[in-house]
Image (spheres, rainbow, N blue to C red):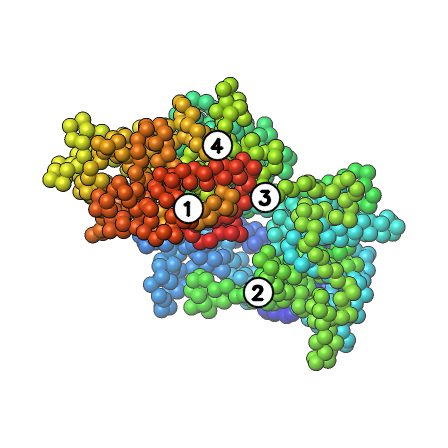
Amino acid sequence: MTYEHDTENSAACAEDKAFDALLQARRRGAYPLVWLAPHEEGVERVRRRLSATPLGFSVGVATFEQWTADQWELHGDGTRPVDALERSCLLWRVVAAGPWAETGASFKGVVALLAQAVSQGVRAQDFDGVALSASQQGLVDSLARYQAELERRGRCELSWAMRDLAGLMAFRGCVAAVGFDELPWAQSELLRRLGASGEALRIDDGCRAASRPDGGVDRAPELSALLAGLYGRADAPVAPTGAVSFLLPQGSYGLGGPLATRIAALACAEADAAREAGRRPLPVVVCAPDARDLFLRLGPELARRGVASQTRGRASCVAFASTVFGKAWLSLAACADQGARTLATLSDVLRSPLCPMDDGKAMDFDAAWRKRRLRPFDDMVADVASRDGFAATLVSLAMGHDFEGALAALEPRLRSGAFGDAALQGESVAAFAALGRFLAAWRDCGGGDDVAWSLVAQRQVASPLAFSAEEGVAGQGDALFCSLSDAARLAPASACAVVLCDMTAEAYPVRVEETPATLLLERIGVVCDLDPVAQMRRSLFRCLSAASTSVLLERPLFDEDGTETYPCLAFEEIVDCYRPYDALDRTVDRATGLPPAMARFASVVPEAHVHENLLGEDVALTGPGQASSWPVGSPAKVSPEGTSSLVGGTFGSDGAHGGGAVVLSPSAVETYLECPLKWFTLRRLRLKTPDAGFGPMEKGSFAHDVLRHFYERLHKQGVAKVAADDVARAQALMEAVADEELARQPALPPSRNPLVAATAAEEAEVRHLKRQLVGFVPWEAQLLASFVPTHFEYGFGKKTPFSYAGVHLTGSIDRIDVNDKGQAVVIDYKSSVKGTYDVRSRSSAPQAGGAVLPDKVQALMYAQVVWRELGLDVVGALYVGYQPRAGKPPALSGAFDRTAIQPSQVWDARAELVGYPQLDDDGCAAYGASSFAELVDEVERGVEGAVASLCEGRIAPYPRTADACSFCPVQDCAKRRD
Ligand code: SF4
């Protein structure tokens, strides 16, 4: 009746001690004899070892969980332990039914905390009499409800069974738990209680000495010295011989190719050595924080070099939500949730392998739906049904919460190989099976229609990946990709080489993570934090023990942002083994940061060959004619062959492209003058979201329509213009017109930019805009008293070409006011009018051959149209803001002919300043125009220069005005000014 806890220097010593103890216990007649190993790999190894000894048939070997489950079945109270899936589903139900639901806490987070507490083996009654905070008490109350739910169902937790088992089974045998690091509380308790009636031994591996290789392969002397000195006592620093080497890319772009080369070289050298020795080659083990990702990058290149590779352990798993099937399923599931479903979720389903619909049609649906706001989801489903019965059935099943039905409908499709190549197909089948198990557990636990999809989203799905070596390639070898902790489970010297990748402090952080659950458990003395430093050291030691001939350490010197990286603790501790014991001698090689003696075994890799490195290729292997290169033109100028596409549509007599002059609108010209690259991006690439929006464009279109219809209705009533003494009636009319326009918006085609509010906040914005339009009416009465608003949305250049500055100009003028002398003023409505609209705001435009032009030219271009098309004497080109500012009139700017219009005819106090000729003669000299009419002509001449520049394909960025970069989509532009 004993309980002993010892720590031996090595795993082999720990096993030898356990072996002796069990042998003696057998001689004493103790029964049963049990050897507990920390993981499946350990169980297999121990069984192999015992099979050739007298203990082969008398010792049971298992993990803690396996042995407890077996014993609980024999001696337990008849309850059955839940598995991880059932636990999370039941905990979710308990949390959802409890007070957490009202606090807005994340169910997922609370479920994870409770699962952590349960895994340690604690029960609610363990906290009786313990002072707890309100939130801790909440967790304990949830734990109590979970216990009650398990009891009601005749289930239990395995960790609770561990605590109770010893009392139920009257243990008289000997149990040895060998090679565990830090045991959960329930397992420690089980050992202690078994020791009260029988013998219990806990023998840990202190990782201070290397275990001898047992596969007939010797370990390289340098590696043996390294393992001896790493955490044990060594007489001298390790002498570098090249068995440990370093690959130091200057950044992540320097990684792929050189790393693939080194791994392939190690694998092929081992293949040759094994062939000579007549044994099977050992694999190269590649460890990385994200080993699966690294495998996907390097695997194909290794195969090309004759090295087969595969994933192992956690690298063989992928989160359900990251699988192709999982992503698509979660979108389909979102269709069942009225609060979560959007056209994006439906589009994702259509474009996924779940549906047979071709991608082009799915994109068409997506584009059509996105052009409309407030499109009912059912209408979109009806669209789908018109094209694809299977997709519609799938979505309808999901919307009816018949997820099992949807899964059954998908099975034949999955079996038909619709999910892509073999790897994706395998991953999808695994995700499909995991989903089936989850749904069964959810329903079994009484889960309703609101399925907690987040429980399945992060579930790990086993999907091992492998690349075979290409046939006929010299060399041949094997590489295993896995995490550091999985590599630590390998037998000593069972790999030829270990490659430790991304050895930075960021990739391998060492920190204690405290959670509310760990703090709660500490209240009853249960400390469940693993010591992260000790854990890292043990993993490193065991991982290095797996190598027989060499170890390669890879560490990028800089991260993606060019910031210097820090080596991780493991890297530092390995390097320290090579340093002289004289603490004062900290000399390092400048290029590598390593002790000089080691630097000769290090390669610093530049990032120069980005393309090859990212693909995992080695630039040295790229033969003549295979170089991946292509000619790159100047980004500032379109090639001569491309300019016809650049300038866009033309009026050809035959309608053919390039058959006539270039067609441009005044606003396009103005954008080109603001910045050629902005014009190219907005007007040619059309980089804007396809979604119907609720922004300045929609509000502007609405306001323009309202203002136009307001005047048309006024004219129909026989009123030419808003009169100062009739403002109230005009405001009532404006309000009525605005309401009518609002009612029409949802039915407008997408090309008209309908203003449709989808939220309460947007509705408030619409009301505000309407108030502004009504508030604009009194100012209308003060604008251009002797002029009458005559033309609205005057279109030009559409049916009949309008020649201007060497192009065909097309567009529409918001409003033209005319007086009885045949004079006209062009009005362009704006939601806001800034200083750049003022005729005094001018600059020379390199994109117009250096001509000095007003920063805004649109209204002055319209002036020329009115002159030529309507024969009117244009005396003003004004920008009028329709949004009155608090206590001030709406903004007004532009230019008008000072000899024809008095500043008093416009309301803005600054109007005096926009009269032309300008008060300051410098302005006229700069433009080379002594009158308003000459200014209009000069603008046309300047635009001619801009058109010529555009037709030459010049699209270099040049922001001519201070606000040119506002609303420009070229976010990473080097010339951006905001
Ligand atoms: S960010 Fe400015 S300079 Fe660059 S393309 Fe846009 S407008 Fe031109």
| Mark 4 and mark 2: Cα distance apart in space | 69 Å
| Amino acid type, label 2 | Val
Label 4 sits on residue: 806
Give the distance between the C-alpha atoms of the residues marked 1 and 3, in whole angstroms: 32 Å
First of labels 4, 2 by sequence position: 2
Which residue matches tag 3?
A: 635
Compute the Cα span from label 2 to label 1: 68 Å
Percent of width and height locating residue 893 = 31, 46
Packing grade of label 1 (10 A; few <14, some 14-19, many >=20) is many
Q: Quadrant of residue 530?
A: bottom right
Q: CA–CA distance between discs 2 and 3?
A: 46 Å
Q: Earlier in the sequence, mark 2 or mark 3?
A: 2
SS at circle 1: helix
Mark 4: give few (<14), some (14-19) or many (20+) Cα within 10 Å. some
> Is residue 886 visible in this depiction of the protein?
yes
575 vs 893, nearest the viewer: 893
Mark 1: amino acid: Tyr
> For this rendering, which residue is in front, 402 or 967?
967
- Residue 448 lies, with reference to residue 812, above or below; the image says below
User: Where in the figure is residue 867, as x and y percent of width and height?
Assistant: 34, 32
Mark 4 against mark 2, which lies toward the viewer?
4
Residue 866: x %, y % from top left: 34, 31
Q: Quadrant of the N terminus?
A: bottom right
The kind of secondary structure element at disc 3 is loop
The residue at which mark 2 appears reads as: 510
Some atom of ligand 1 lies within 8 Å of the CB belonging to the residue at label 2? no
